Image (cartoon, helix red, strand yellow):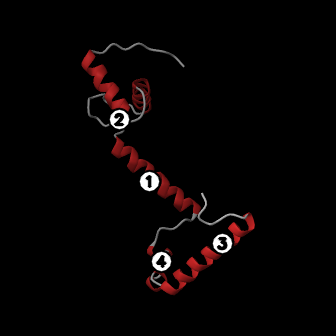
Amino acid sequence: MRNITVSVDEETHRLARIRAAELDTSVSALVRDYLKSMAADPDVDGEAGSGSVETVYQRRCRLLREVLADFDRQGIGLRMSDNLPREALYDRDAARAEAVAERERRRSISEALGTSPCDS
């Protein structure tokens, strides 16, 4: 990797450091990413505000799109049909039965270990 030196005025340096902190990165990483995007896309004109630096919102949107695409690749669905039907969601008898079974499971484990279920 090659090093370069860039001179900027104090205010630009201060604002760049603030922006880098907002993006949880360094000024060097911002400059490196900007130069990479310029080298990859000859249409980038370098004007301020051209969108070459990803904002926190843009980064979150990109990450969300990546997660959803990963869900699609893995066959994980987020469709309404993948959810429980309303009757199952509000089946209080089933919920009570699950709670009783969980309490019994914890009780049997604590008895086997010789501790109280409330011991931390």
Q: Which residue is mark 2?
A: 22
- Residue 51: x and y in percent read 31, 37
Q: Of 91 and 98, which appears nearest the observer?
A: 98
Quote the CA–CA distance across marks 2 and 4: 39 Å
Question: Mark 1: few, some, or many residues within 10 Å (few <14, many ≥20)?
Answer: few
Task: Give the structural element (helix, strand or loop) at label 3.
Answer: helix
Q: Which residue is mark 1?
A: 65
Circle 3: residue type: Arg
- Residue depth check, mark 3 versus mark 4: number of the one nearer the observer: 3
- Callout 3–callout 1 Cβ contact below 8 Å: no
Task: Give the structural element (helix, strand or loop) at label 4.
Answer: helix
Task: Give the structural element (helix, strand or loop) at label 1.
Answer: helix
Marked residue nearer the N-terminal end (1 or 2)? 2
Quote the CA–CA distance across marks 4 and 1: 21 Å
- Callout 3–callout 2 Cβ contact below 8 Å: no
Circle 2: residue type: Glu
Q: Which residue is mark 3?
A: 107
Circle 1: residue type: Arg
- Callout 4–callout 1 Cβ contact below 8 Å: no
Quote the CA–CA distance across marks 1 and 2: 21 Å
Q: Which residue is mark 4?
A: 81
